[in-house]
Image (cartoon, rainbow, N blue to C red):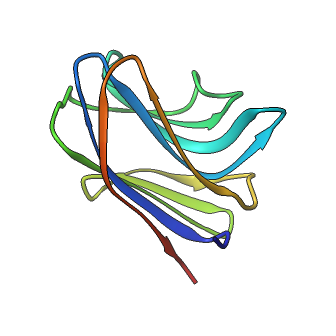
Amino acid sequence: MGCNYRFTGQAKMGPSGAYAFGIRTGVNSGVPISQVIQYEPGEGWYRDALIPDHSEDGRTYLATLNYGWNTVSMSVLGNRYLASVNGTEIFSGTTPLTCGGVFIRLWRGTVQLKDLTVQQLD
């Protein structure tokens, strides 16, 4: 995979589930490093974070608790990234990460995933 791509997938969580999709992911001493969008339904928001150091203090976007299917997409081109949910842009910015793969994190309950794709961008 190249360094510029779009990672898209659908996620549906059960009660108390939570998830994150990430781009430009690498691993340092067994710890993932990634630019992520996290759905934190217990908090009522999506969070834009650079993990692991800023997983609890990134920008937030208010979200309604939703147990249906949601399409999450993250694109990265150069040092710019864009994150959207169900076609609505919710975060954009720059990332210090220069290259890497995709990342999926699931925690605190059941989460279903489908239609995961990675598309190369020029």
Q: Name which residue lies at 66% across and 73% down.
A: 2
Look at the picture and state if 115 lies above or below 1.
Answer: above
Q: Is residue 23 visible?
A: yes
Residue 33 at what x, y percent from top left?
A: 71, 40
Q: Residue furthest right?
A: 29
In the image: residue 59, left or right of residue 14: right
In the image: residue 18, left or right of residue 1: left
Residue 92 at what x, y percent from top left?
A: 50, 54
Q: Residue furthest bottom?
A: 122
In the image: residue 40, left or right of residue 105: left
Q: Is residue 39 visible?
A: no
* Quadrant location of the C terminus in the rendered image: bottom right
Look at the picture and state if 63 lies above or below 76.
Answer: above
| Quarter of the image where one finds residue 106 | top left
Q: In this orientation, which residue lies closer to the viewer: 50 or 105? A: 105
| Quarter of the image where one finds residue 13 | top left
Q: How many numbered discs, if any?
A: 0
* Quadrant location of the N terminus in the rendered image: bottom right
Look at the picture and state if 84 lies above or below 39.
Answer: below
| Quarter of the image where one finds residue 88 | bottom left
Q: Name which residue lies at 53% across and 77% down.
A: 120
Q: Name which residue lies at 39% across and 59% down.
A: 8
Residue 94 at what x, y percent from top left?
A: 64, 55
